[in-house]
Every structure is written in C-alpha cells, then in structure tokens.
Amino acid sequence: MSGVPEHVAKVLCFAILRIAIIEQRPCYLVFFSTAVETIALTELKTSLPHLIRFLSYSFGGGTDAASALEEAVVQVQTAQFAKADVLMISDFIMDSVDATTAVAIDQCKQTGTRFHSLVISSAGNPNALSIFDHNWVYNTSCHKPFKDVLKNVRYLKT
C-alpha cells in the first residue's frame, strides 16, 4: 500500500489511536508489511514518539497479514488485552488467511474478542475479509469524509 491509501490508513490509525488514548484504553499497534513490528501505546506522553516513528514508516512491500494476526491473537490472550477488539487496517490485497490462523481467531472470538477490518481499497480479497466480524470499507476514489468511517468504528468495546 502506498500513496493516497497509505496516507488515509495513517490518518485513520492516528485518529482511532487518539480516541483510545483519550479514553484511557490500552492499545497495541502491530505494524506489518513483510515483517511485523509492535508498539504498546498506553499514555500519550510516552507513546507519542513511538507513534510518530510508526507514522514515518512506508507501508509498501507486501502484506504478511498472518504474522500480524498471529501477534494480535497472542496479545488478546494476555490479561491486559483479554476480550479486546482487534482492528486491522489494510488494503487487503493479499492471500487468504491460513487455516491455523483462522482457527486461532475463531477461538479468540469464543472468549469475547471481536475482529474488525478497515479496508482502504476497493479491491480487497473477500476471502481474507471473511474471518472478520465487521468490515468497513474506505474507498479512496470517492470523497466520503473520514468522520463517517470513524463514527462507525467508535462503537468498539472497551
């Protein structure tokens, strides 16, 4: 993902993380392309430098969603993130999620975790999206404001 979709993903990610930090909800950011990097975001004061560094990354280079989802599964099995929502922001131009990861996600769903996707594209893989409880689409070729997308994302539980 690059260009306008990358910029849109970064702005939406920042807006969602800002809401979570203001509401004092812990966040765990998993950056993924061909590798996975993680950032624990807890307080704005200590998290801001890490978030700025994240926003400077380029998202081009491929999509290794399985590794990112595996990391999300690990985190929701901890006490701090038990029953947390998982939100994946991507263009979802990728392969379908493998069976092992899909089973792990289903097990997390049985304990109260919900998995959401925010698709920044009009060409996401429908098979990859089938594992998510909710799928929101932001098509960069239309001019629907971010506010409408964020309004729908705001109902994520604490």
Image (cartoon, rainbow, N blue to C red):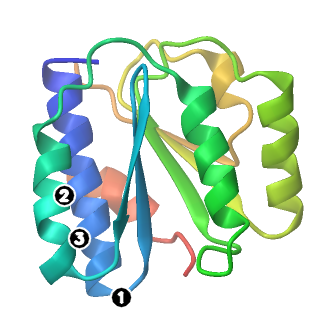
Q: Which residue is mark 2?
A: 51
- For label 3, the residue is 18
Q: What SS does tag 3 mark? A: helix
* Dot 3 amino acid type: Arg
Q: Residue at the spot x=43%, y=27% of the render?
A: 35
Q: CA distance from mark 3 to mark 2?
A: 10 Å
Residue 24 image label: 1
Q: Earlier in the sequence, mark 3 or mark 2?
A: 3
Name the amino acid, label 1: Gln
Which mark lies nearer to you, 1 or 2? 2
The picture places residue 32, in percent across and down from the top left corner, at 41, 32
Secondary structure at numbered mark 1: loop
Q: Give the Cα distance between marks 1 and 2.
A: 16 Å
Labels 3 and 1: the sequence-earlier one:
3
Q: Height in image: 116 above or below 137? A: below
- The extreme bottom residue here reads 24
Q: Residues within 10 Å of mark 3 (few under 14, many from 20)?
A: some
Q: Residues within 10 Å of mark 2 (few under 14, many from 20)?
A: some
Give the secondary structure at mark 2.
Answer: helix
